[in-house]
Amino acid sequence: MSSESGAVIADWALPPNGGPPTDDNTLWKRIAAWWAEFTLQTKLLAVATLVVSLMMTGITFFALAGIQRDAAMNDTRYARDLGLLLAGNVTELVADGQDRELANVAEKFWRSSRSVRYIFFADPEGVIYLGIPISATPNGEDGELRLNRRLELPDELRRRPQNPLVRQHLTPQGTVTDVFVPLIRSGTYYGVLGLGVNPNETALASAALTREVTVAVFISIWVLVILGAVFNALTITRPVKELLRGVRSVASGDFQARVDLPMGGELGELLTGFNAMASQLEAYDEANIEELTAAQVKQQSLIATMADGAILLDATGRIVLANPTSRRLFRWEGRSLEGQELVEELPELLSIEVHSALDALLFSSSDSEDLRCSVGEPARTLRIVMQAVRDASGESLKGIAVTIQDLTREVELNAAQSRFISNVSHELRTPLFNIKSYVETLHDLGDQLTEDEKKEFLGVANDETDRLTRLVNDVLDLSRLESGRTVQFETMNLRPAMEQTLRTYRLNAEDKTVELELDVAPDLPDVLGNWDLLLQVFDNLVGNALKFSRPGGILSMRAYVWPDTCRVEAPISTKSEGPTCTLTSPLPRLRVEIADTGYGISAQDQQRIFDRFYRVENAVHTEVGTGLGLSIVRGILDKHGAQVSMVSELDVGTTFWFELPLEQADRDELALQAERRSISAASDDGNIESVAVGSD
């Protein structure tokens, strides 16, 4: 029983570590905390119950004390009446000295009343000379019934014969009421009558019954109070406390909290409604968590796949999140950045520039900062935008969103565009100046010039006009290629285009005594391409080859399938569903080559041969050109998903080649390859131009 009672210790009575309370102060605090958990209504109900119980207890004890006091007064009054009655009958006998008659009367009186325990008589000196049922020792004839004992009584007793002395004392047989009545006759004091009276049995029985009833009522009241408190705790307080705990759990985010109590009535409906509400909140929370998780995954995926760098900082400037782009820009791959200060992780020079802007957001009312800087080697131009994230009131700073844009490519393109415009302006200015000069000379000095000089001036103007036309056409062609327009492909045979190109340059070749050759199989497969664009490629490549060919040289055009095999091997395992094809080389394409036996191109010029406005003839010889032909060739072949390549050696010759897809090729895959080639070529142009500017 002790172990069970010890196990059922209220939670509020235990210290934080779960052991028995060791400090009275701690116990008092826990009692105060337990009392504070109750509602005001419950506290008022408990206080009212306690007050009523204390009042009933006081009334009960007051009534019990009154009953006992009345019983004592009844006994005292009864004993006094008996003493006065006996004294009135024996005073005359005492005065006459009739001791034997006195003894007989007293004995009869003692025997006739069961309430009288003893009777004794004392002389004026207080010496007891007769006692019933006390026996006396005979001392002589006259005093054989006298007692040799003395009684000490108050002196004022003889002066108030009508007010006998009454007192009570406790004996092993119970409480006895003593009555002392002075015996006075005709003003003469003859002694004292002592009378011992037992309590009135009827009064005692009535008092005992009243006392028992009162105690029973008192116990019943407290039992009812205790039962009421237990009932209140079981039916009202406990469910309310459990419900309060459940509400607190739900408020703290624990939607799995339930109140499992077998209750009926309104409280039962309230608990059932709470459990239903918690279940709905739990389901709603799970749905929200799934949505939030999905949204968070989307946001993280979006941030991770952003082309720009993104960094999230907390309200103190420490890194919370950094996407892969920002890690790549600042070379943070594989590092744990969470909780680190941004300015400490940046390069030193960049950290100095960012520090002031970051302080403006953290310690002032600034909402955004925008700065540009260069970082790394080779230098990259970055634009860093920092935006403060504040609460709804706009006063408290919650964090900072940092966006990093790599403007290197944009800067390079702007520089390339500026250089392109400058080059175009320069190339246009030279023929226009020549045309203006010769036409102006003809206009001003026409009469003074001979016919041959006029023809010469007009010929120069005509040549410069042709040069200007070629330059404008090349610029337009290059612009169209870089405009991003989709090229329409169709199935075509390259042999007619190659033959048409050779026919176009046959007269020029004969003038330079250069032999033109065409090496194409009769069964050349068809390819996917654009007739006009490929014809322009052939025209530019053959024209350049003829321009750099020496007299007596050979210019060849060849076309063949490469590679021409795809070996099919036996399956490795007999469990395979069918034969497998192991590709020993890429899928076949049609390779086109244009080769000459001219002067060749140096290794240094080969690195820049496809740059815009770069002309090898400026360093080798005086052949004219715009310097855009090979750039146009590369742009057209990029649209076809092909790559132009070359090999050259000085005084030996040069060969250009490229590969075109056959008609069976996947058009979608071809468009994807063309897009990739265009992006790669644009990046190469920017890098080459930046290198060229640095070299200049």
Image (cartoon, rainbow, N blue to C red):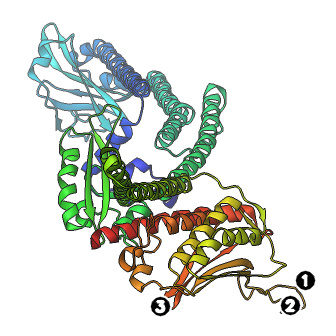
Which residue carries the number 3 mark? 651
User: What amino acid is labelled 2 in the image?
Assistant: Pro
Return the residue found at the far left.
155
N-term mark: 1 or 2: 2
Q: Residues within 10 Å of mark 1 (few under 14, many from 20)?
A: few
N-term mark: 2 or 3: 2
- The reply, left or right, for residue 538 in relation to residue 184 is right
Q: Residues within 10 Å of mark 3 (few under 14, many from 20)?
A: some
Which residue carries the number 1 mark? 578
Q: Nearer the viewer, residue 441 or 646?
A: 441
Which residue carries the number 2 mark? 571
Instruction: State the SS at label 1.
Output: loop
Picture residue at 18% right of the left edge, 41% below the top: 364
Q: Residues within 10 Å of mark 2 (few under 14, many from 20)?
A: some
Disc 1 to disc 2, C-alpha distance: 7 Å
User: What amino acid is labelled 3 in the image?
Assistant: Asp
**Image marks 2 and 3: residues in contact by CB distance under 8 Å:** no
Image quadrant in which the C terminus is located = bottom left
Q: Which mark is residue 692?
A: none
Disc 3 to disc 1, C-alpha distance: 55 Å
N-term mark: 3 or 1: 1
Q: Nearer the viewer, residue 482 or 58?
A: 482
